[in-house]
């Protein structure tokens, strides 16, 4: 089979790779219906997060089960499944508390930009649909695998409730789906920070009531203006830079909540500033598995359409162009279709 391998900064190749096989009896092999490129894939792609050797890429996936190991009980060959970027047994104490992305048996998925994928801990990691879903829902189902699950966690961690005033920092795919999530959770007002016309438009479609294009101190001042000088109840931090984190902390009302899901790069917080900000901070790698059944149902019932964040669809063999388009911000998010998928 063939798949995407990163060799170094901006050098991604589509190459022959060995087909995955069952290694542990709890594994499954799935044939991907669709995969995609994550905003976090751009960190190593840009060389900001250096790689030691040629590295297979991809951690968002959905597809049809081809084979299961002898200890897999619930997942069956032929089922359509979605899984998270983090594997989980879904039974340990941490999983029972809803933090499957810190499962004691966790592994991070990293070879999903390919036609076939080995998924460890299949019973705990994968969620199957009862029937094969219609083709047009595949992009939205793929979105539940990471980008929607992560936006949803950001909103949940930020304690979004009926009537909340919400701020979303970051207009990437996760931020945009954070807007959708906050809307689903009943937010009254959703302020999206964005400077890009196409992203502003999608933010409004997903439920944003206000758009703020200023950043830094000016951005904070605008949020204060819009919230009677108080700040937002709930802030979703979906970038992971020092600037975005400070934007979030300074825009939250005392006693308010920040859900941070942007993977931090070079973020350091000042203890005293944090102390007097008087905010709740909760974030980390999203426990997508906790939300998957609910999110898959919302998609199948056609209540939400998170697949709209994919504004570029390419055959998998054009994966390099998919990365370029996202790197140059020509695309919000690229969906990849493996060749020969039914
Ligand atoms: Zn676990």
Image (tube, grey):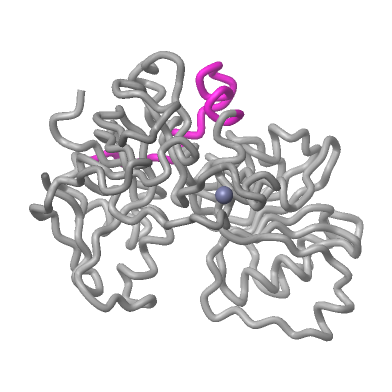
Near-viewer residue (53 or 46): 53
Residue 244, given in percent of the width and then of the height, sits at 62, 69
On screen, residue 65 above or below 40: above
- Identify the residue at horizontal 53%, vertical 66% (top origin): 263
Q: Horizontal placement of 192 versus 113: left or right?
A: right
Residue 98, given in percent of the width and then of the height, sits at 66, 46
Q: Quadrant of the C terminus?
A: top left
Residue 329, given in percent of the width and then of the height, sits at 37, 58
Q: Horizontal placement of 333 versus 181: left or right?
A: left
- Identify the residue at horizontal 91%, vertical 56% (top origin): 228
Is 68 within the magenta? no
Segment tinted magenta in the rendering: 294-314
Residue 270, given in percent of the width and then of the height, sits at 75, 85
On screen, residue 210 above or below 62: below
Q: Horizontal placement of 320 versus 61: left or right?
A: left
Is 310 within the magenta? yes
- Identify the residue at horizontal 61%, vertical 29% (top origin): 294
Q: Is residue 288 visible?
A: yes
How many labels were placed on the picture? 0
The part of the image, by quadrant, that contains residue 79 is: top left
Q: Quadrant of the N terminus?
A: top left
């Amino acid at each position: 089979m063939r798949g995407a391998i990163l060799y170094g900064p901006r050098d991604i190749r589509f190459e022959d790779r060995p087909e995955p096989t069952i290694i542990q009896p709890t594994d499954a092999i799935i044939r991907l219906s669709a995969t995609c490129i994550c905003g976090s894939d751009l960190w190593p792609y840009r060389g900001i997060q250096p790689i030691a050797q040629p590295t297979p890429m991809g951690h968002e996936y959905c597809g049809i089960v081809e084979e299961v190991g002898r200890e897999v009980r619930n997942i069956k060959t032929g089922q359509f499944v979605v899984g998270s970027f983090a594997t989980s047994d879904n039974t340990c104490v941490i999983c029972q508390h809803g933090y499957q992305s810190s499962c004691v048996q966790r592994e991070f998925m990293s070879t999903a930009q390919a036609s076939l994928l080995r998924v460890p801990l299949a019973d705990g990691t994968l969620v199957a649909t009862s029937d094969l879903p219609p083709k047009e829902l595949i992009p939205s189902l793929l979105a539940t695998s990471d980008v929607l699950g992560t936006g949803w966690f950001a909103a949940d961690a930020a304690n979004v409730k009926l009537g909340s005033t919400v701020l979303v920092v970051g207009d990437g795919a996760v931020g945009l789906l954070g807007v959708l999530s906050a809307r689903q959770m009943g937010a009254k007002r959703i302020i999206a920070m964005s400077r890009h016309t196409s992203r502003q438009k999608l933010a409004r479609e997903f439920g944003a009531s206000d758009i703020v294009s200023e950043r830094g101190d000016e951005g904070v001042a605008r949020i204060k203006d819009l919230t009677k000088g108080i700040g937002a109840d709930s802030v979703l931090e979906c970038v992971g830079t020092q600037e975005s984190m400070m934007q979030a902390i300074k825009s939250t009302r005392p006693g308010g909540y920040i859900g941070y899901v942007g993977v931090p790069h070079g973020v350091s917080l000042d203890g005293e500033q944090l102390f007097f900000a008087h905010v709740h901070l909760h974030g980390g790698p999203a426990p997508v598995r906790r939300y998957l059944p609910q999110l898959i149902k919302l998609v199948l019932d056609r209540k939400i359409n998170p697949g709209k964040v994919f504004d570029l669809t390419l055959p998998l063999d054009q994966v390099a162009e998919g990365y370029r388009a996202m790197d140059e911000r020509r695309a919000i998010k690229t969906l990849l279709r493996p060749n020969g998928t039914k």
